[in-house]
Image: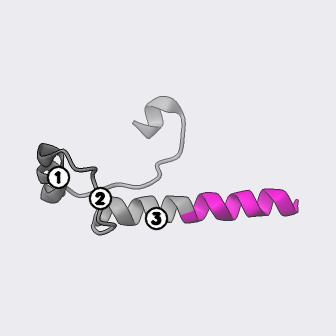
Amino acid sequence: MARSIGLPLAGSLRPEAAICQALEKGDAPAADGRGPLAELCKRLIRQLVQEDRAGVAA
């Protein structure tokens, strides 16, 4: 996907059964803040905040 839209790969995830179960129940994926998807999202947000702060300082 990243290559097709010309952006760097942000991360990759292994299959996570809990996501399918949550979606079947109507829950948001990674809503409990745990698991590979949640960790990837946290990492991306930290990186974006750091880049934003660096941009403000520049």
Q: Which residues are magenta?
A: 46-58
Residue 22, numbered label? 1
Relative to 12, 3 lies left or right: right
Q: Residue at x 15, y 58 (%)?
A: 18
Screen quadrant of the C terminus: bottom right
Q: Residues within 10 Å of mark 2 (few under 14, many from 20)?
A: some
Give the quarter of the image for residue 16: bottom left
Name the residue that disc number 3 marks: 42
Q: Amino acid at mark 1?
A: Ala
Q: Earlier in the sequence, mark 1 or mark 3?
A: 1
Q: Earlier in the sequence, mark 1 or mark 2?
A: 1
Name the foreground residue: 52 vs 15: 52
Relative to 3, 52 lies left or right: right
Residue 42 vs 20, above or below: the answer is: below
| Contact between labelled residues 2 and 1, with CB atoms less than 8 Å apart | yes
Tell me, yes or no, whether the highlighted magenta stretch contains residue 10. Answer: no
Percent x, y of residue 37: 32, 58
Residue 30, numbered label? 2
Q: Amino acid at mark 2?
A: Ala
Screen quadrant of the N terminus: top left
Relative to 21, 8 lies left or right: right
Percent x, y of residue 48: 61, 57
Task: Check the image and tell me how it is coloured.
Answer: one colour
Badge 1 element: helix
Badge 2 element: loop
Q: Residues within 10 Å of mark 3 (few under 14, many from 20)?
A: few
Q: CA distance from mark 1 to mark 2?
A: 8 Å
